[in-house]
């Protein structure tokens, strides 16, 4: 009887030990991920400037370099915010490869900033119109810099090597658009990965706000539809290039999808780190990223309880018009400035 009891105790001891090791390893991965993430992103605050002259009293304050004044209020950049650039690259290749030659890196047809705020525990997403006119660096086929000129932001990725070089160029363009906003990491994902990502969480249910059709699918306004991988691909990527404003309408659909997708991810919060790691591994060949698995583990476990709803997805306000050859989107500068302050800054209590 004693031998049997000893065997049972031994088995339980082994099980508990294994559990403790798994927990310890996971915690070590999280700590390492956090350390690496902040160590490699020791960046300055955005270069947003005050829109109003400081009063004598404000000049007498211990003014901080990352403060700005707007509409009579002082704002302070939130240095604890984590911001990531997610790019959907207009390529159907099943594996990302380095490319050569002018503008062969692929255009960033989808551009989103994913923002995690640990202060108010919120997740926010900023959708950037692929036709946004901004400063783009042009290079020749030998990767020699030519000039910087106003162009659609989506083409910046194409002037790189299709991998890290392209991502760094696109990251710079987006950062500069938002007053040199610090971006802590990026992921450029070929459009061929949409089906894999969608189906990894069991598909996504959406309610379109307008009728839309592709070669294979029809979507109707107000009619709920559960998207499998192929349908999700058409819903997110399809647009009528002959119709002006088609990129704007596609971005609205992407907003609908991202809201539903993120809510579904959050509903599986207990499995967040494991699910994130699973997707990461499954699309690794179709993705270029500077976020490591340990960093992803830290992010997924840290933000799983953050709030998110339909109001957490922001789209740049502005105007689309036809250029000489292609559509051009001009953001509303005042609205963008207000949005940056709202998301990335916090009000300073000067009387506190």
Image: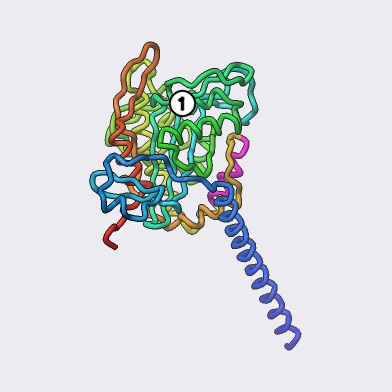
244 w.r.t. 200: above or below: above
Residue 65 position in % (x across, y down): 41, 48
Q: Residue at x 51, y 23 (%)?
A: 137
292 w.r.t. 87: above or below: below
Q: Residue at x 29, y 58 (%)?
A: 349
Residue 284 position in % (x across, y down): 61, 39
Looking at the rendering, which quadrant does residue 306 occupy? bottom left
Look at the image and tell me in which quarter the C terminus lies.
bottom left
Q: Residue at x 37, y 43 (%)?
A: 259
Q: Nearer the viewer, residue 167 or 244?
A: 167
Look at the image and tell me in which quarter the N terminus lies.
bottom right
Q: Residue at x 51, y 19 (%)?
A: 147
Looking at the rendering, which quadrant does residue 261 occupy? top left
Crowd band around label 1 with a 10 angstrom C-alpha radius: few (<14), some (14–19), many (20+): many
Q: Nearer the viewer, residue 98 or 3?
A: 98
Could one spot residue 50 in this view of the protein? yes
Could one spot residue 263 in this view of the protein? no
Which residues are drawn in magenta? Answer: 275-285
Residue 70 position in % (x across, y down): 27, 44
Q: Is residue 140 left or right of residue 115?
A: right
Q: Nearer the viewer, residue 287 or 150?
A: 150
């Amino acid at each position: 009887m004693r031998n049997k009891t000893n065997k049972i105790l031994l088995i339980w001891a082994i099980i508990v030990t294994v559990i403790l090791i798994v927990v310890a390893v996971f915690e070590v991965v999280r700590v390492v991920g956090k350390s690496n993430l902040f160590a490699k992103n020791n960046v300055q605050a955005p270069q947003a400037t005050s829109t109003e002259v400081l009063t004598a009293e404000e000049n007498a304050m211990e003014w901080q370099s990352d403060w700005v004044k707007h509409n009579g209020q002082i704002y302070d950049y939130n240095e604890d915010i984590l911001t990531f650039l997610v790019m959907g690259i207009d390529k159907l290749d099943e594996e990302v490869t380095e490319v050569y030659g002018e503008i062969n890196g692929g255009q960033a047809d989808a551009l989103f900033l994913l923002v995690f705020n640990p202060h108010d525990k919120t997740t926010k997403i900023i959708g950037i119109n692929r036709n946004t006119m901004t400063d783009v660096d042009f290079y020749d086929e030998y990767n020699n810099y030519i000039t910087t000129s106003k162009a659609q932001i989506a083409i910046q990725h194409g002037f790189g090597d299709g991998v890290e070089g392209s991502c760094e160029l696109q990251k710079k363009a987006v950062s500069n658009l938002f007053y040199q906003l610090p971006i802590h990491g990026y992921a450029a994902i070929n459009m061929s990965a949409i089906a894999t990502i969608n189906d990894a969480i069991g598909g996504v249910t959406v309610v379109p706000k307008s009728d839309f059709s592709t070669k294979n699918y029809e979507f109707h306004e107000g009619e709920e539809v559960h998207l499998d991988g192929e349908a999700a691909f058409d819903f997110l990527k399809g647009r009528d290039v002959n119709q002006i404003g088609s990129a704007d309408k596609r971005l609205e659909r992407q907003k609908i999808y991202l809201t539903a997708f993120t809510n579904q991810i959050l509903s599986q919060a207990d499995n967040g780190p494991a699910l994130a790691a699973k997707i990461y591994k499954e699309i690794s060949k179709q993705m270029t990223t500077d976020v490591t698995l340990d960093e992803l583990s830290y992010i997924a476990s840290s933000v799983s309880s953050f709030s998110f709803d339909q109001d957490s997805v922001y789209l740049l306000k502005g105007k689309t018009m036809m250029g000489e050859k292609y559509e051009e989107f001009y953001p509303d500068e005042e609205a963008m400035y207000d949005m940056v302050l709202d998301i990335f800054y916090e009000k300073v209590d000067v009387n506190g």
